[in-house]
Amino acid sequence: MIASILVALLAVVLAGAALWRGTRATVVYPPMVGLLYRDGQFRKELAPGRYLRFDPFGRTRIVRVSRAELPAQMGEMTVLSADQFSFRIGLAPVLKVVDAQLYAESQAAVEDEPWSQFTPLASGHAALHALLASAAVEAVAARKLAEIFAGQQAVAEDVRAKLEQAIPGAVVERVLLTSITLPPETRRMFTDVERARMEGQAALERARGEQAALRVLANAARLVKDNPGLANLRLLQAIESSKGATTIIVGNPAAAPGLAIQPDAPAKS
């Protein structure tokens, strides 16, 4: 009797162990979704959550695919403008997954359980990199370098339009222009041009200021000539605002008609 009970308990334990070893757990966190495959065939899409399945022979697999809109880092690429300036440009397309199954399968995202997952930031974007480079070369070749600097967003928008439907299961929401790196000689040339432009603008502003000052002085001289009393009033204002002791000399024939002032000499001990 006791032997039978022990055998039954052992059988239950062995069955529980087999059940435990054959049970697989996968957690899908937002903004990811899960793709359930069985024997290599797609079964269904899984919403975020925890999933337990009995699979002692490893016939099922859950692939996690991110729906987050994240920029794919592609690095810089060399391009040539319409006026034959060579430089490097950095672009980062922002992908939005609209069909998780098609996107994952087109990117060969199915990997070993249970850590299978794929995001737009993964390194396996060889096809996207080639398409992005082609679109960037075409967009930049249609513009001069000065036009590219003046309308950087237009270049990014042209690249986005060429790539919008290029990735199966995803769309390119926008393209970020992350960097423009000029060769030293080209950068120096643009710096010299900008410096010359700003120096010319500064000289023009100085000339305008001098003209305005001369115009004010000419108007003041004309007023003093037409109204000699204004000179005396101005002199009185100067006396009021002067500091220290002053001497007023009246009737100096060498001076202009009116009053004149000069500061007192310091007292000698």
Image (cartoon, grey):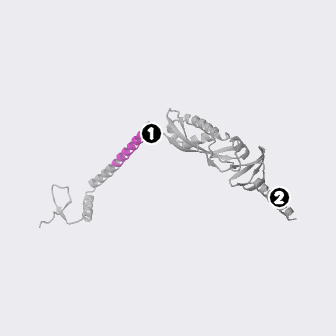
The quarter of the rendered structure image containing the C terminus is bottom left
Q: Which stretch is magenta?
A: 189-210
Rendered residue at 53%/36% (across/down)? 78
Seen from the viewer's position, the closer of residues 23 and 39 is: 23
Neighbourhood count class around disc 2 (C-alpha, 10 Å): few under 14, some 14–19, many 20 upward: few
Q: Position of residue 184 (x, y in %)?
A: 44, 38
Using the numbered discs, state the Cα–Cα distance from disc 1 to disc 2 in whole angstroms: 79 Å
Neighbourhood count class around disc 1 (C-alpha, 10 Å): few under 14, some 14–19, many 20 upward: few
Q: Amino acid at mark 1?
A: Arg
Rendered residue at 51%/41% (across/down)? 180
Q: Position of residue 133 (x, y in %)?
A: 59, 37
> Quick one: which residue is furthest to the bottom in this view?
269
Is residue 99 visible from the viewing direction of this image?
no
Vertical order, 268 against 57 (above or below):
below
Which residue corresponds to mark 2? 11
Is residue 200 visible from the viewing direction of this image?
yes
Q: Position of residue 120 (x, y in %)?
A: 64, 46
Seen from the viewer's position, the closer of residues 259 and 151 is: 151
Which residue corresponds to mark 1? 187
Seen from the viewer's position, the closer of residues 57 and 99 is: 57
Numbered badge on residue 4 = none
Vertical order, 204 against 23 (above or below):
above
Magenta span: predominant SS is helix
Is residue 3 shown left or right of residue 190? right
Q: Nearer the observer, disc 1 or disc 2?
A: 2
Seen from the viewer's position, the closer of residues 217 and 202 is: 202
Q: Amino acid at mark 2?
A: Ala
Is residue 198 shown left or right of residue 1? left
Q: Secondary structure at mark 2?
A: helix
Does residue 124 show up magenta in the picture?
no
Q: Position of residue 267 (x, y in %)?
A: 14, 66
